[in-house]
Image (cartoon, rainbow, N blue to C red):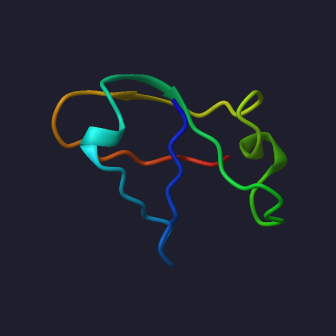
Amino acid sequence: IFIAAKTDTQGRFTVLAQDLPVGRYAVYLGPDKPEIPKQYQSPLESPLVVNIQAGTNELTLDLK
């Protein structure tokens, strides 16, 4: 499943529940944004993984 979401000026985004079933997902950002480290700009290399559960999920993605 591929879901795209745009961030607001504070980096927040929303994905509707009907678009994203419960499960484990790799998250990547970008592409080609100089302020985002390269490792987070590829779906194959991003270390960001989230578990989506039923109901509302509020997640903080820590870019180190």
Relative horizontal placement of residue 5, taking residue 54 as reference (left or right): right
Return the residue nearer the eye: 49 or 21. 21
**Image coordinates for residue 51, horizontal then vertical, percent:** 38, 26
Q: Residue at x 63, y 49 (%)?
A: 63
- Which residue sits at x=83%, y=47%? 38
Residue found at the far left of this picture: 55
| Quadrant housing residue 13 | bottom left
In the rendered structure, the answer to whether residue 53 lies left or right of residue 40 reads left
Which residue sits at x=66%, y=51%?
A: 29
Which of 11 and 5 lies nearest the eye of the viewer? 5
Residue at the farthest top position:
23
Give residue 11's position: percent from left, percent from top: 50, 67
**How far across and down, in percent of the image, does residue 1 sit?**
51, 29
Q: Locate residue 28 relative to residue 23 in the image: left or right.
A: right
Q: Left or right: 44 with respect to 58?
A: right
- The answer to which quarter of the image holds residue 30 is bottom right
At a point 52% along the width and 64% down the height, the residue shown is 6
